[in-house]
Image: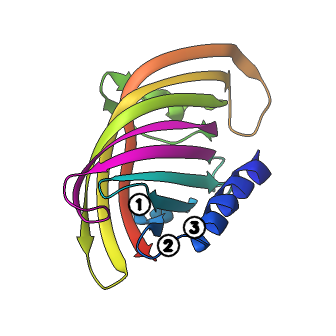
């Protein structure tokens, strides 16, 4: 799966390298960087007001004290810009899908009716897929550089197994599933436009 993710991202970047000037952007989400999640995105201009983006994220590291925060996901997105592409306000629709292995993350988070505190005592391993809508804004900070903020919300379906602890293999629940409404995108992107 990880090789497929990297192949997809490299294909987009190779296509982007051959595209016309001011129609392609490459970006990194600084919020994901802060959580040690490797990420890259590419955005291609389709018309004066429409762009298409694909971003990929992966975190494959083990954390201290038996905690798990491993995941990978892909997120394709279509954007409608209110002014010109890569500038100002935009609205977006996106999909999301990937796999995760989370556990023993002490928290008391409850958002949109979803209680994440069970992540404190158990480990969850599974996959997810969903779709959402978003709003964002891009600020020009140089001739080729932008800073972009975006927030999205949507629906997520997940299927998972629950384990007793982060390191052991004792399965407590198998093939559980859940639907919920949650944030599907949070980004502060550093963008380079070709």
Identified at 62% across, 54% down, the residue is 58
Q: Position of residue 4 (x, y in %)?
A: 76, 49
Q: Residues within 10 Å of mark 3 (few under 14, many from 20)?
A: some
What separation in Å lies between label 1 and label 3 (alpha carbons)? 24 Å
Q: Is residue 95 magenta?
A: yes
Q: Which residue has dot 3 on it? A: 16
Q: Which residue has dot 2 on it? A: 20
Sooner in the amino-acid sequence: mark 2 or mark 1: 2
CB-based contact (under 8 Å), mark 3 and mark 2: no
What separation in Å lies between label 2 and label 1 (alpha carbons)? 29 Å
SS class, disc 1: helix
Could you say which is closer to the camera, residue 154 or residue 143? 143
Sooner in the amino-acid sequence: mark 1 or mark 3: 3
CB-based contact (under 8 Å), mark 2 and mark 1: no
SS class, disc 3: helix
Of helix, strand and loop, which mostly describes the magenta segment?
strand
Res. 148 image quadrant: bottom left
Res. 62 image quadrant: bottom right
Q: Nearer the viewer, mark 2 or mark 1?
A: 2
Quadrant containing the N terminus in the rendered view: top right
On the question of residue 74 being in view, the answer is: yes
Q: Which residue has dot 1 on it? A: 31
Identified at 52% across, 61% down, the residue is 42
Q: Residues within 10 Å of mark 2 (few under 14, many from 20)?
A: few
């Amino acid at each position: 799966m990880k090789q497929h993710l990297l192949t997809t991202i490299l294909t987009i970047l190779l296509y982007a390298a051959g595209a016309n000037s001011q129609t392609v952007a490459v970006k990194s989400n600084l919020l994901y960087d802060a959580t040690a999640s490797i990420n890259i995105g590419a955005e291609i201009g389709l018309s004066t007001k429409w762009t298409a983006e694909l971003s990929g994220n992966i975190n494959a590291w083990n954390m201290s004290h038996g905690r798990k925060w491993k995941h990978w996901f892909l997120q394709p997105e279509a954007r409608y810009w209110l002014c010109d592409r890569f500038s100002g306000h935009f609205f977006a629709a996106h999909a999301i899908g990937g796999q995760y292995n989370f556990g023993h993350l002490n928290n008391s988070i409850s958002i949109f009716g979803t209680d994440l505190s069970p992540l404190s005592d158990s480990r969850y391993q599974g996959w997810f897929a969903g779709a959402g809508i978003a709003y964002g804004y891009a600020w020009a900070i140089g001739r080729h550089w932008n800073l972009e903020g975006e927030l999205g919300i949507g629906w997520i379906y997940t299927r998972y197994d629950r384990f007793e602890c982060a390191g052991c293999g004792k399965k407590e629940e198998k093939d559980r599933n859940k639907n919920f409404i949650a944030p599907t995108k949070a980004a502060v992107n550093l963008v380079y436009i070709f």
